[in-house]
Image (spheres, helix red, strand yellow):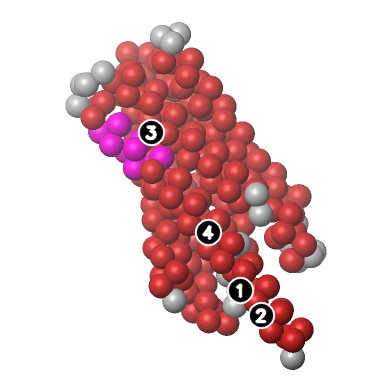
Amino acid sequence: MADHVGALLEEEQLSARRIVLMGGAASGEIVGGGGAVVLAIIALSGIIPVTLLAVAGLAVGAALMFEGGAIASRYRDIAAEIDNRFDLTALGGGLSAEFLGGAAGVVLALITLLGLNSAMLMAISAIVYGGALVIGAETAAELKALTLPRTEKHEHLQKIARSALSATVSVRVMAGLGAVVLGILGLIDAPSSITLSLVAFLALGGTVLMSGTAIGGKVLAIFRH
């Protein structure tokens, strides 16, 4: 009896840690994605577009890094729990692509803030972020799903959250491909490069924001239960 109670308590503690993890990752995405959307809209209106474009790039990159770091912090526990049911090497590779893409974009945005060839660098940054989203979309959704609480009382909310995560995969892929195309066009058409990059970051920020809100609301629902 005591062992059973102890196992239940341990499972509840694990579920609580997972909820906090998912809430943190979602918060990072919401803040970073939302910030990028606002900054891109302001910049498109003609207010210091280059500076705001670079800051929007920092916001998107930070959101991707925060998401990847939050999930990676639980990667070992996930691996221990699911054994060989999934190809963890492939999952880890997709997660690394998103994290490294975010880090590379942050570096490019910082260089842009220094005033070094801003148009070309931010177009490249859009390509990097877009590629990272395309490569890591399915992986991020799968790993987020694996970190969801698996207790019986959370089963219904878990199914809803999984559905929400699945829906974000195609959106992230489409936004990523769009950002890649806009970034390439920006490299080809220098006069329109800043505007094209701003549109790309508007799409990227909106996608990251949607991804965060898709799971964030479910995490809040779990807390209420």
- Which residue, as the protein is rendered here, is positioned at the far top? 116
**Is residue 182 at all visible to an observer of this figure?**
no
Residue 38 falls left or right of residue 140: left
Q: Mark 2 — residue? A: 8
Residue type for callout 4: Val
Mark 2–mark 4 distance (CA, rounded to whole Å): 18 Å
Q: Which of marks 1 and 3 is nearer the N terminus?
A: 1
Mark 3–mark 4 distance (CA, rounded to whole Å): 28 Å
Q: Which of marks 4 and 1 is nearer the N terminus?
A: 1
Q: Which of marks 2 and 4 is nearer the N terminus?
A: 2
Quadrant assignment, res 143: bottom right
Prevalent SS, magenta region: helix
Question: Is 125 situated above or below 91?
Answer: above
- Which residue, as the protein is rendered here, is positioned at the far right? 84
Q: What residue is shown at x 66% (from left), y 54% (from top)? A: 74
36 drawn magenta: yes
Q: What residue is shown at x 61% (from left), y 73% (from top)? A: 12
Residue 50 falls left or right of residue 153: left
Camera-nearest residue between 19 and 117: 19
In the image, which residues are magenta?
32-41
Mark 1–mark 2 distance (CA, rounded to whole Å): 6 Å
Q: Mark 4 — residue? A: 20
Image location (x, y in percent) of residue 162? 52, 67
Quadrant assignment, res 43: top left
